[in-house]
Amino acid sequence: MAWGCEDSLQQQTQQQAQLQTQQQLGIMVQSIANAIDSPSLTSVEALVRYGTDSRYYVMIRGWIVQELTGVESQLAAQGDNADPTLVNKAKHLKISLRRIDLE
């Protein structure tokens, strides 16, 4: 009987650890999404902090590249009447990519 209790306790501990990891990843994803959408020095620092972590480098760099591609596409479509907000966002994303690549 005690053996079954140990297995149950071990499963609960593993589930709690997995839930905590999932919550941490969710927080990270929300932080990155906010940092991408709101250009600032603080946002660049957040993107660089997560983007230079070897566990997440490929995912975050790819995300930023895709966002930049979308923004550049919108800027190309707008031509000379480009929205300054989009211009700023493109600069922000390029700076973040450069910083991640230089680390």
Image: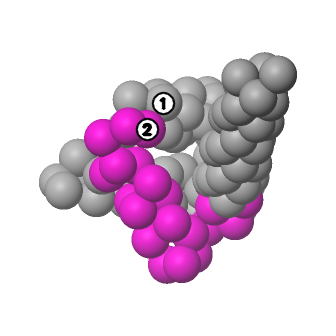
Between residues 27 and 69, which one lies in front from this camera angle? 27
Q: CB of mark 1 within 8 Å of CB of mark 2?
A: yes
Occupied quadrant, residue 76: top right
Against 3, residue 61 (above or below) is below
Q: Give the residue at mark 2.
A: 56
Q: Quadrant of the N terminus?
A: top right
Q: Give the secondary structure at mark 1.
A: helix
In the image, what residue type sits under mark 1?
Answer: Met
Label 1: few (<14), some or many (≥20) within 10 Å? Answer: few
Residue range (magenta): 33-56
Residue at the far bottom in the pictured view: 41
**Quick one: quadrant of the C terminus?**
bottom left
- The reply to whether the magenta stretch includes residue 44 is yes
- Residue 73 pos. (x, y %): 61, 28
Horizontal relation, residue 55 to residue 60: left or right:
left
Q: CA distance from mark 1 to mark 2?
A: 5 Å
Picture residue at 60% right of the left edge, 36% below the top: 67
Asked if residue 88 can be seen in this view, the reply is: yes
Q: Residues within 10 Å of mark 2 (few under 14, many from 20)?
A: few
Amino acid type, mark 2: Tyr
Q: Verify whether residue 102 appears in magenta.
A: no
Q: Is residue 2 left or right of residue 63?
A: right
> Is 101 above or below relative to 6?
below
Question: Which residue is nearer to you in this view: 9 or 25?
Answer: 9
Residue at 76% across, 36% down = 9
Residue 71 on image: x %, y %: 63, 38
Rendered image: mark on residue 59: 1
Could you tell me residue 8's position as x and y percent?
79, 28
